[in-house]
Image (cartoon, grey):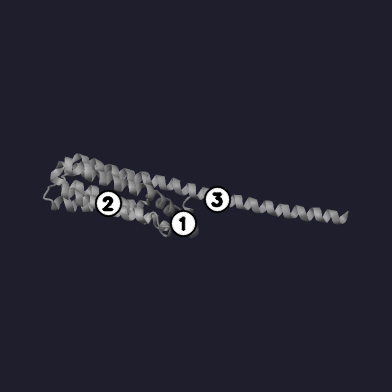
Amino acid sequence: MEDKQIASTPELKREYGREQAEALWKINRIVAPLAVLMVAFLILFSDQVNFPLFYHHMLIGRLFAIVLGSIVIIASYIPTLKNRGHLFSFLLFLGLGLMMAHLNGVMNNDSSSQTGWLFINIIGCAILPLSLSNSAAVVVISFAYYFIIYFSSGFVADVAFRMTLVNVGIASLMALAFKVAQSRIREREFFFRKSLEKANMEIADLNEKLKDENKIGRASCRERV
């Protein structure tokens, strides 16, 4: 039976969604605090020292990651929200994506911010087990925000602008393509695991029936004797 049947079976589809949401909810406990601490470290020991002219503009971008990351940290320790893991992973990825888009926009595509945005999109799209639609939505929103910030800052579409679109865009598309393959593997693993559990339950039921039949058979033999 193909993994496509997961989507066509409402019960399995809901169970698969719950399992993925709970996994993301647990992942957020680790990823969100690390992300917020990393951003706070950059604000304190990097931005003001290395980029004094852009410090206040960069701080606005950093706030996206800090505010949304803090919300995700709180949510990851509330058991009643474990079925909303997808939502909070989306918010975490969105906060980091908007942060990097903002930094690229106000810093005229500085090489360090461009590299950071590239890695954030690769990690968020390819490694974080978020759904394809949510990952793609973050990429689209981040690029839209980047266009707004970049042109409102008075910059023009120069070589660095085009290289940012090419480098970050291609990396994001490749990461999303990897996610498609990764999602199919994850779905197939889920289906085969459920099939195995069902087979084991059927075997256990057959064993119980055989035990009952053996007891009845022995009882009838004793009566004949």
Kind of element beneath mark 2: helix
Give the x, y percent position of residue 187: 46, 49
Residue under label 2: 66
| Residue 172 found in image quarter | top left
Can you say which quadrant of the picture contains the C terminus?
A: bottom right
| Labels 2, 3: front one | 2
Relative depth, front residue between 16 and 83: 83
Density class for disc 3 (Cα within 10 Å; few <14, some 14-19, many ≥20) is few
Cα separation between marks 3 and 1: 14 Å
Residue under label 1: 13
| Labels 2, 1: front one | 2
Kind of element beneath mark 1: helix
Q: Is residue 151 visible?
A: yes
Question: Which of pointers 2 and 1 lies earlier in the amino acid sequence?
Answer: 1
Question: Which of pointers 2 and 3 lies earlier in the amino acid sequence?
Answer: 2
* Circles 2, 1 touching at the beta carbon (< 8 Å): no
Amino acid carrying mark 3 in the image: Ser
Give the x, y percent position of residue 214: 76, 52
Residue at 44 percent across and 45 percent down: it is 185
Amino acid carrying mark 2 in the image: Ile
Residue at 48 percent across and 54 percent down: it is 5
Residue under label 3: 195
Q: Is residue 116 left or right of residue 72?
A: left
Q: Is residue 172 visible?
A: no
Give the x, y percent position of residue 129: 39, 48
Cα separation between marks 2 and 1: 33 Å
Relative depth, front residue between 87 and 54: 54
Q: Is residue 205 left or right of residue 105?
A: right
